[in-house]
């Protein structure tokens, strides 16, 4: 029996882990044992615990209860805690997702004591090292033994960085194996799409009609912490709502909630509060987000995960960041990068809102990425 230690800490990782946990439970329970470590990077109950309950993820075996904090302090505490778990559990590998501080801490802790690193969502690049996530994902990739990229672009990025696409076993950190395997989030979206219809009433609760509202999310610190950017984003949403008589649904991330009253122009905030079509809500659960994504007209987001989920449900997306690691969304015309630029946001909305021939090619696999990953680990660990 092979033992995996899975590190999760932020909301997207909890969701991604559901796909692998489900594959292990259904198809690999006699070959793989999973130990789940929750760093506590996202500690808000609506952002974390609800996902375990809702998605049927096994309860964490360990919770480091790190909470929020500056990058260095948060990463250091996680690094120490993860190392203790690895020394105690002696796993065959550590499984890391994406690009958060939890990912970075897990990669450093494991590589220092020679535990093989499995990186799911490897090879993604925004080519902006001003983003903490870019640094995290690059550093994780370059100490990993097994790198599973959800896209051909990600796979090609790894090849450009010197990874050998023809590596042969045995695989190590010095002889890593890279894969284009599809996206575990696509696995989840297919699986939970029908589940969301019976297990959430978010549309009825918010009195929303199919294809009659914009779904927006804003949470990145360069958007929330900089008043000029935050005001540009909120003014764009307000103006589009008024001009097109469209409802805007904004599930409010805890970071945004803390800063909205201090960083948002008072007059603009007053207008938004009196706009009955601008619905600022509590953080949405995963199934609620699936329901909102399936039924909205268009998505406007600074979240990497939500960009993809919009694509899975064939919804156009305005990307409220200066760049995206999911370049294929832009290349096929389903998404437009606008940064926090008011005129670009409005232009992108008009363009996507008027297009009737948007294409959503199958870029993210066949919905069985988690099974593929498990099978490769069973054969090569």
Image (spheres, rainbow, N blue to C red):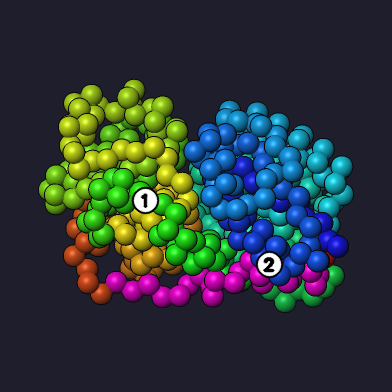
Query: Which residue is painted at 53% across and 62% down in the image?
Result: 188
Residue at image location 82% in from the left, 38% down from the top = 84
In the rendering, at what x and y percent does residue 168 appear? 79, 75
Q: Quadrant of the C terminus?
A: bottom right
Q: State which region is magenta.
A: 358-380
343 magenta-colored: no
Could you tell me residue 255's position as x and y percent?
Answer: 44, 32
Mark 1, secondary structure of its residue: loop
In-front residue for pair 209/333: 209
Task: List the residue tagged with mark 2.
Answer: 26
What residue is shown at x 81% (from left), y 66% (from top)? Answer: 31
Is residue 368 found inside the magenta-colored segment of the image? yes
User: Image quadrant of residue 280?
Assistant: top left
**Pointer 2 local density, CA inside 10 Å: few below 14, some 14–19, many at least 20:** few
75 versus 334 height, above or below:
above
Q: Mark 1 packing: few (<14 Cα in 10 Å), some, or many (20+)? A: some
Quarter of the image for residue 328 reads: bottom left
User: In the displayed structure, does residue 372 sit left or right of residue 367?
Assistant: right
Residue at the location (54% across, 50% down)?
A: 54
Measured along the vertical axis of the image, is residue 69 above or below residue 221?
above
Q: CA distance from mark 2 to mark 1?
A: 28 Å
Give the mark nearer the N terminus: 2 vs 1.
Answer: 2
Mark 2 vs mark 1: in front = 1
Whether residue 363 can be seen here: yes
Q: Which mark is residue 201?
A: 1
- Residue 125: x and y in percent read 53, 57
């Amino acid at each position: 029996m092979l033992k995996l230690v899975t590190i999760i800490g932020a909301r997207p990782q909890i969701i991604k882990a559901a796909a692998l946990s489900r594959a292990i439970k259904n198809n690999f329970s006699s070959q793989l044992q999973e130990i789940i470590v929750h760093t506590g990077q996202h500690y808000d109950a609506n952002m974390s615990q609800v996902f375990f309950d809702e998605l049927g993820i096994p309860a964490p075996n360990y919770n480091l209860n790190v909470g929020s904090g500056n990058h260095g302090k948060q990463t250091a505490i996680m690094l120490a805690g993860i190392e203790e778990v690895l020394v105690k559990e002696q796993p065959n590998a550590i499984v890391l997702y994406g690009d958060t501080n939890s990912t970075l801490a897990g990669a450093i802790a494991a590589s220092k004591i020679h535990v093989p690193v499995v990186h799911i969502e490897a090879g993604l690049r925004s080519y902006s090292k001003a983003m903490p996530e870019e640094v995290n994902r690059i550093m994780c990739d370059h100490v990993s033994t097994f790198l599973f990229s959800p896209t051909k672009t990600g796979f090609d990025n790894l090849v450009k960085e010197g990874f050998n696409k023809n590596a042969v076993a045995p695989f190590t950190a010095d002889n890593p194996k890279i894969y284009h395997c599809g996206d575990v989030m696509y696995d989840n979206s297919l699986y939970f799409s029908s589940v969301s219809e019976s297990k959430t009433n978010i549309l009825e609760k918010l009195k929303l009609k199919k294809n009659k509202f914009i779904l927006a999310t804003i949470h990145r610190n360069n958007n929330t912490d900089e008043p000029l950017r935050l005001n540009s984003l909120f003014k764009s949403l307000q103006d589009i709502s008024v001009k097109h008589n469209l409802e805007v649904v904004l599930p409010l991330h805890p970071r945004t909630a803390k800063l909205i009253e201090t960083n948002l122009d008072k007059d603009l905030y007053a207008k938004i509060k009196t706009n009955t079509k601008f619905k600022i809500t509590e953080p949405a659960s995963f199934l609620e987000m699936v329901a909102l994504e399936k039924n909205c007209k268009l998505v406007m987001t600074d979240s990497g995960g939500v960009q993809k989920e919009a694509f899975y449900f064939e919804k156009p997306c305005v990307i409220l960041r200066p760049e995206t690691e999911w370049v294929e969304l832009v290349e096929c015309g389903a998404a437009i990068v606008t940064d926090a630029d008011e005129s670009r946001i409005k232009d992108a909305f008009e363009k996507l809102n008027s297009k009737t021939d948007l294409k959503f090619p199958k870029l993210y696999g066949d919905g069985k990425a988690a099974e593929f990953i498990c099978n490769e680990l069973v054969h090569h660990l």
